Image: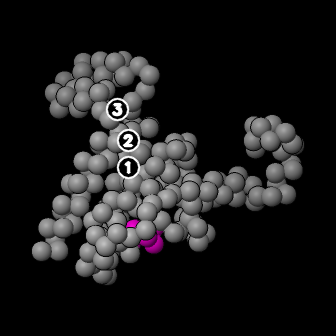
Amino acid sequence: MRSLATELGTGPMTIYNYVDGRDGLEQLVTEAVLASATWPDPSGDWRADVHAVAEGMWRAVRAHPHAIPLILTRRSFDLPALRPAEALVQALARGGRSGTELLVAFRTVAAFVTGLAQAELAGPLLRDTDVSETTGRIAELPFAGLAEIAKAAAASDPEAEFAEGMRIILAGLHEKTR
């Protein structure tokens, strides 16, 4: 709270007039990040719509990497923050899912979005400024598979990773509707 107050040019106690402590502040951050997600209007193709909403969510989360732990651990009942989740559910439902199948599809896509953002921005194979150090350390371990993906992570494009992951998920969801 002190560093936030300093950043805002006010005293820490002033912030408590607007938020209910740290929990209240963290809730506002979570809601602001989720509410910032954007995507185009439905296209008529449920797969394209799922991809578009998921990408909007992914971009919103990636834009605020320090908020990822909050997004993973906080529930929000703020309507603007729930709008991306509802859009994703509606897009998945247009693929012919309901009930438990819809729930599982929603959780799968939502987990991919937040998990990929977390893995990219805070995981052991993160794309930091010294990727060669991370790659080198993992390559020294007696795990050939981890060494291989560490090298791939060093050259990976997050956009391409997201697109390929969504392609895999959507192919599986499409297969289930046949």
| Secondary element type, mark 2 | helix
Residue corresponding to mark 3? 125
Q: Which of 13 and 43 is in front in this view?
A: 43
**Which picture quadrant has residue 5?**
top right
**Which picture quadrant has residue 101?**
bottom left
Q: What residue type is labelled 2?
A: Ala
Quadrant the N terminus occupies? top right
Cβ–Cβ under 8 Å for marks 3 and 2: yes
Q: In this view, does 173 lie to the left or right of 105?
A: left
**Residues drawn in magenta:** 85-89
| Secondary element type, mark 3 | loop
Q: In this view, does 20 lie to the left or right of 76?
A: right
Q: Which amino acid does label 3 sit on?
A: Leu
Instruction: Using the image, determine if residue 125 lies above or below residue 96.
Output: above
- Of the numbered discs 3 and 1, the one sitting upstream in the chain is 1
Residue corresponding to mark 2? 119
